[in-house]
Amino acid sequence: MERESINFDVLIVGGGPAGLSCAIRLIQVAKKNNREIEVALIEKGAEIGTHALSGAVLNPIALKLLIGDYKEKGCPIEADVREDEFYFLAKDKAYKSPKTPKYMHNSGFHIISSSKLCKWLASIAESMGVNIFSGFAGAEVLFKEDGKKIAGVRTGDKGLDKDGGKKGSFEPGIDLLAKVTVFAEGAKGSLVESIAEKLDLFDKNMPQVFEIGIKEVIELGESNYFKTSKGNDIHTLGYPLGLNTVGGGFIYEMKNNRAAIGLIIGLCYKDCELDIYDEFIKFKKHPFIANIIKGGKVIAQGARTVCVGGYYAMPKLAVDGGVFVGGCAGFQNSPGLKGIHLSMYSGMLAADAIIEALEKMDWTSDSLNLYKELFEKSWAKAEIYEGRNFAQAVSKKGILKFLHLGSQYFTKGKGLKDPMSLKPDYKTLKPKSKSSIKKEKHKYDDTLYIDKMTGVFLSKTIHREDQPCHLIIHDIKLCVTTCYKTYNCPCVRFCPGGVYELKTDEAGKEPELSVNFSNCLHCKTCEIKDPYQNIKWTCPEGGDGPGYTIL
Ligand code: SF4
């Protein structure tokens, strides 16, 4: 097939904080060096920010370095953190901790919407001359003839019917070629996964592990909790997950009488009957939380996974012709539940290394490894390194968990064993016969407590129905036989979009699994958690997916 190809100096795949910070820094440094540079950035969302979702408390350390006068330049800040509050939730009670763990001291940081931040960063990047192409998904990594050096990315074809045939509106993907390609895809990036299959990016003994967060923005009444509370950055532990399932909740104040609320769950959970959405509703119905959000109305909802494996789970940061930044490269402060500042800084360090490589006309891994060297000497490394055994410790049970966490707290992350080993999330489920979860029937009110499908509606997720399903199930028979019998098809409960639906109508008949891909929130949980690794998430047509604006 004839395909158009376009050449750039640098191609960035992903318009999140890491990719956009990289783009801005590239232009800044090139300008300082009196150098012309052609930078392109592609984003699979219909617009920049529509696939961006995060808590989000922003430590402005990287933003200050990138755009010193960010406030004057109109950075969209929802609120400044006045004070942190940390609670332990028992079933009907909340106990305020006299001390907030040191990693969660957010006073002076900013509460933001990741979606709005990305939009604002993109406006700055565009004004500096970065070519931004939204609605273009990276479908395939292009390699040089040797099959090892990255040459660029092919964008996805548009206008295929559900069997992969060309419709009248068919537009072939474009080959975007670059001296250096920056992968900034976010957690579990599909292109990074495909490169890893060829170039061995990850340490097999330290697999990346993840948490999923479901988040809502709630419109509160005029007089609400945050009008009188000291703290506006609330974190909780305990109910509904208990202490043996990793995770916790958060509520942050936003401007215009709004609040961001979310529940984060470690995908290392063991009980196959755990329903992620149900847990979120239980969290919202806890008396302490219900009191904060009472009288409110959900106006936006979404979900996304975040990598939490820490320093030992990070991949190689540079290969010939390519670098990895942000979530897809594991930049996250796991104990502090923050990653945007680290993602931004990774993009900036990568930009510095790329400019050096372009000056030297050498974009081999040896040259681009300057990025890794800069990272190793930076505050970002120190921050990530301190959480190097955190995901391992929180996944332990009972007293052992607290022994590990306590010792890590006082030894800058070293703890009782360093390094502690990690187990991939897909290997942690126990069979359904070992489940201890009792299903609760929730009452929804379509306003403050909404069901999954209303949540998908409020995520503004859209996929053209007549296109190939982007969720590839390698063996559907395995789902309805082995997986159904052993784990009762956990995809039905871990997918926050209600994509997987199990039909068990007729007695004696094998169940059927349907895949409603048009509800997909692009959170990637299914690819991570499926116990048989039977699901592969691929990019649907560019521009499809969630339509986040304030998450
Ligand atoms: Fe997330 Fe997979 Fe469900 Fe899509 S199908 S919303 S990626 S779990």
Image (spheres, rainbow, N blue to C red):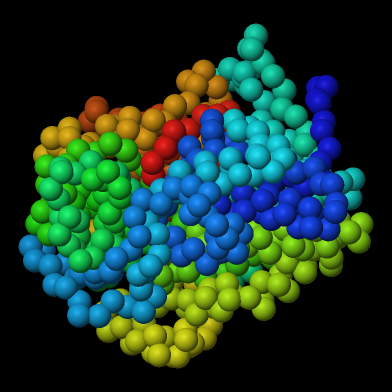
Measured as percent of width and height from the top left, residue 217 is found at: 29, 44
Q: Residue at x 53, y 73 (%)?
A: 384
Relative to 358, is 456 above or below?
Answer: above
| Residue 31 visible, this angle | yes
As drawn, the residue found furthest toward the front would be 72
Measured as percent of width and height from the top left, residue 273 is found at: 27, 52
274 vs 466, left or right, is left
Q: Quadrant of the N terminus?
A: top right
Measured as percent of width and height from the top left, residue 396 is found at: 35, 76
Measured as percent of width and height from the top left, residue 270 is found at: 33, 62
Residue 109 picture quarter: bottom left
Determine the quadrant in which ligand 1 lies.
Answer: top left
Q: Residue at x 20, y 48 (%)?
A: 281
Q: Nearer the viewer, residue 321 or 108?
A: 108
Q: Nearer the viewer, residue 458 or 39?
A: 39
| Residue 271 visible, this angle | no
Residue 408 picture quarter: bottom left
Residue 82 picture quarter: bottom left
